[in-house]
Image (spheres, rainbow, N blue to C red):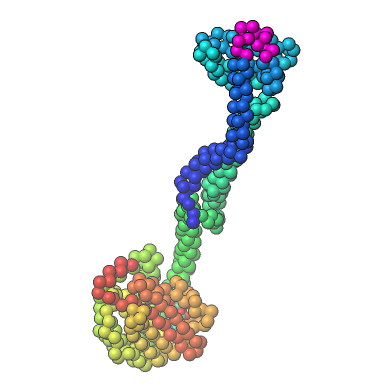
Amino acid sequence: MTSSLKTRLVLAFLSTIIVPILAGVLTMYLGASNPDEEEEQLDRLFIEVREEIRAHEENLPDGDVFYEDIEPLLNHYDMNITIRDQDGQLLFDSVNYRQRSEENSFLPGFNTFTIQTDSETGAPWEVTIDAGSSEREPFQQMTNVLHVLFLSIGIGLLTLLLMIIIWTTYISRTILTPLKQIYKATEEMRDGNLDYPIRYRRKDEIGRFIQGFDYMRQHLKESSVKQQQYEESRKELIASISHDLRTPLSSIKGYVEGLRDGIVRDEEKKRHYLQVIHDKTTHLDHLIEDLFEFSKMEVDQLPMDKEVVNASDYFKDLLHNYQAELIDQHVQVTYTENIDSVSILIDPLRLSQVMNNLLENAVRYGSDRIWIDVHSDQNRRELVVRIADNGQGIEEEDLSYIFTSFYRAEKSRTTEKGGSGLGLSIVKYIVKAHGGDIQVDSEEEKGSTFVFTIPLYVTGNAPEEDA
Ligand code: ADP
């Protein structure tokens, strides 16, 4: 599970505070020696001091005698004592009686304890004990405690430093490194390289940002590829328009000139010339119509005027008309008589354009028999239309390109009968705009089968937006 950046930052701050404190406390806990024993030793010292003072209390006014009384105790613990009365008046200070100067080198304020002792008069005295050396028991215990305290603070600070380093490294890895990559990717994009993906697997805020950035890159790449294709197809379009328009136009010109100059006198020949001119202008008309449709398709503005129709009624009429037309062209048509009575949401004119194109192609590419099958597939909730012919077929290497604009298979390019190469791309566009798909299967010299689908219209289905 990936935690969000916010959670990780909160964690970072909390752990930077808590972990060093814990480390310090733990060190103190482990480092502290047995506190009971230490207290016992100190208590024993306080009791001994108190007892000793009380035992020689009467000698206190004579400092020398009192000092002699308590000297063994002072030497034993290597300490100094000061006694004051309750008004703070100094009654005795052992420093004044010590002989050797080096023994006077106490550490003032260090390991200093103040104890109260009751004098016989009932007024409490305040006894201050200064340790001569912090290395000697029981003062050493206190030194140890101080050492442990310093050690704990040291370890706490070290842990704090460590935590800061760890989190800084971590944050720089999770935030700064991807930011650097984004910066690099931006530079690459600026230089025109749109193939520079950023790898970042986490799904946190940065991950989402990078994902968005990558979508933008891919989108830019797609638009740039599209733009290139568009440019290519523009070039192709201009080349093919000039070629396709020029060929029939020059033959029309030749025939018209022949007629104008009176070269043709024979009525039969004249009629033939006029027929050729008529055929060529029809061809030109088709080409221009295809180009017009294509240009609208290119800008996604081929209008679709959809309505709900009954597939059975629609296709029955359509196929009946085609059958009559095709018989005139000596093509035998077999089609499904009983078409399922299902509803489809279509633009009737555009769908007839699809059928028209596919049937025209079948005839154009050498078929004299066409089989049309229309049935509904309830499982996939679609209407399936299959148009099979026994024409010249399509070579395997051409199959995947025939739906591309301006693509004409080698065979049709070399013959006069070829069209603009736009028919099938317009067909595919219309089928897709209806939410369907189109496939082709073909075997050379045996024939081709085109199958397209249109989704069934179920009441309550929102009509698809016009393409
Ligand atoms: P065209 O205007 O050249 O027919 P299309 O886009 O309609 O352009 O078709 C593209 C190419 O697909 C054609 O040039 C032809 O080679 C091939 N083709 C299409 N339909 C058939 C078919 N029924 N039989 C054989 N070849 C076909």
- Quarter of the view holding residue 433: bottom left
> Looking at the image, which is closer to me, 18 or 246?
18
Q: Is residue 307 left or right of residue 88?
A: left
- Quarter of the view holding residue 333: bottom left
Q: Where's ligand 1: which quadrant?
A: bottom left
- Res. 263 visible in picture: no
Outermost top residue = 62
Magenta part of the chain: 56-69
Place of residue 208 in the rendered image (x, y in percent of width and height, measured from the top left) = 46, 53
In the displayed structure, would residue 152 be above or below residue 103?
below
Q: Is residue 210 left or right of residue 308?
A: right
Which corner quadrant holds the C terminus?
bottom left
> Looking at the image, which is closer to me, 240 or 28?
28
Place of residue 355 in the rendered image (x, y in percent of width and height, measured from the top left) = 35, 81
Residue 59 part of the magenta-drawn span:
yes
- Res. 68 visible in picture: yes
In the displayed structure, would residue 70 be above or below residue 342?
above
Residue in the image at 58% along x and 43% along y: 166
Residue in the image at 41% along x and 85% along y: 362
Numbered marks: total: 0
Residue in the image at 38% along x and 79% along y: 452
Residue in the image at 53% along x and 46% along y: 175
* Majority SS type along the magenta span: helix
Q: Is residue 310 left or right of residue 236?
A: left
- Quarter of the view holding residue 310: bottom left
Place of residue 85 in the rendered image (x, y in percent of width and height, measured from the top left) = 54, 11
Place of residue 235 in the rendered image (x, y in percent of width and height, measured from the top left) = 48, 65
Residue 238 part of the magenta-drawn span:
no
Q: Is residue 399 left or right of residue 102?
A: left
